[in-house]
Image: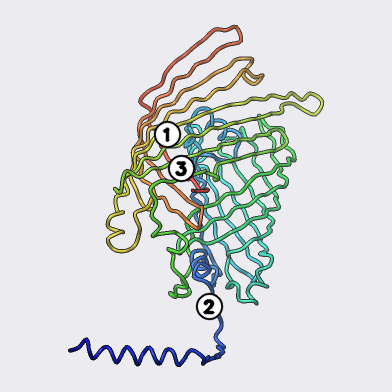
Amino acid sequence: MRKFYLLPCALLLAGALHAQKDTIFVSHSESTEVLSPSTITDARDEVFKMQEPCRFLLKLNLAALLPLQTRDGAIYRGVFLDDIWNVQGLEWSGEFKLFPSLSVDAGLQATLRNQGNWFTSLTARIEPRWYYGMSRKIKKGAQADNLSGNYLSVEFAHTRYKSQAQGNVNSLLINWGAQRRLFNLGYFDLGFGAGMGWVSSGPFSRGGRILYARPRVAIGLALARRQSDKNTGSYCDVLRCFVEERRMWKVDLFTLADFYADYRTRVIALNPKVAFEQKIGTSPWSVHTEIGGSYYYGRYTSGLNDQKQYFHTQVYQTAVSLQPRWYFNLKRRIAHGKSGNSLSGMYVGLQGRWSYGYEPASNIQAGAERSVQHWSLAPVWGLQHRFMRNGYADFNIGAGLASRQFCFVTSNGDKVAWKEGGLIYLAGGLRVGLAF
């Protein structure tokens, strides 16, 4: 019987629809609500802390501990000898905001270890900074009164060396930079500086004025007083937490190029690296493979103005590394709804690496050529994250065993080879660049 009851209901509904065919209802409403910013904009503000006031920032630059340093000797040893962790630095600083556009940054930098010697130099610096355009952004509400922005600065520094053979250096530089906070405990400061230095005379230094330029790279930890617990967006909009990834191509831009120049030294180093990471099925295991090359060119000047001598050298290096990785907490993060099945998160791995460096005959080597092969195997701990659309950062560190084989060919064609084994090798580094 219920089917018969449905029949008149259907007929009434059809008639009502037909009757409304010639009638048009127009409704109009107006809202005075301001459109809220997009989620991704809020997330960027939260990641870089653009809307959080900050008048003081205590910073520890972890990039000073990374392999490649902007020094002629350190770059040369890193490219040829693969002893890239031999030069280590420790840099910390504090920055205080005086006015919305003006701050003062001051700090200390110590060279911890250089060619087996500890605490070889200490540098103290002070740097007034002008954050151009910040006052305008604060008035428009685009950001809070803080220490995240682009700036111009004048930096005065004094470097004192432990060895009396090197002359102490006073320097004055003009810098351009871009500083941003990262989450609650991080920061980065990238830029470029050029200026003059004054070197005191010593047993192996004539002293005098020098002109030089350098890039500036600082990435590390930053402490600031929390102003608010309010979250303006989700980190996952920037870090791509729930994007499913099974494979990833990576191009490192962090160590792509380095240089140093003063009155007696010209150094250029190029270090392109390309990596590919493939997940094993849907498991938390993956295989990371990296291929890289390095090119180093150095020109050195010796002697006085009327008796100058020029020396030059070039070094080529190629390296291949293979690293199985286990993202040990990936399944737990997926189960708690914090991540997708991706290639982001903490991991442990086993890095195997081979490299070959070659230095052709040059006048700095008295017409001789040499080469070196390097093998290493090291367990590493690391952290990798995707961010934005095509960005990634990957840091890992570990210690293992290494061996090296040297080959030296004199100008007369005589060949000498020897091997060193059982070396302790500190592996790892930081990669920041593009991911696809």
Which disc is residue 360 wearing? Answer: none
Question: Residue at the location (38% across, 60% down)?
Answer: 242
Q: Is residue 181 left or right of residue 361?
A: left
Q: Mark 2 or mark 3: which is in front?
A: 2
Tell me which amino acid carries mark 1.
Answer: Ser
Question: Residue at the location (40% across, 27% down)?
Answer: 375
Tell me which amino acid carries mark 3.
Answer: Gly
Question: Residue at the location (60% across, 73% down)?
Answer: 142
Spot occupied by residue 40 in the image (x, y as percentages of width and height): 50, 67
- Give the SS element for disc 1: strand
Identify the mark nearer the N-term, 2 or 3: 2
Identify the mark nearer the N-term, 3 or 1: 1
Q: Is residue 369 above or below residue 188?
A: above
Query: How far is the residue under mark 2 from the one under mark 3?
Result: 40 Å
Q: Is residue 251 left or right of residue 376?
A: right
The image's colour scheme reads rainbow
| Closest to the observer, 327 or 402 | 327
Spot occupied by residue 175 in the image (x, y as percentages of width and height): 68, 53
| Pointer 3 with pointer 1, Cβ within 8 A | no
Tell me which amino acid carries mark 2.
Answer: Ser
Q: Is residue 96 above or below residue 321?
A: below
Residue indicated by mark 1: 321
Spot occupied by residue 318 in the image (x, y as percentages of width and height): 51, 29
Spot occupied by residue 280 in the image (x, y as percentages of width and height): 32, 43
Quadrant for the N terminus, please. Answer: bottom left
Question: Residue at the location (64% across, 30% down)?
Answer: 297
Dot 2 alpha-carbon crowd within 10 angstroms: few under 14, some 14 to 19, many 20 or more: few
Dot 3 alpha-carbon crowd within 10 angstroms: few under 14, some 14 to 19, many 20 or more: some
Dot 1 alpha-carbon crowd within 10 angstroms: few under 14, some 14 to 19, many 20 or more: some
Identify the mark nearer the N-term, 1 or 2: 2
Which disc is residue 36 wearing? Answer: 2
Residue indicated by mark 3: 429
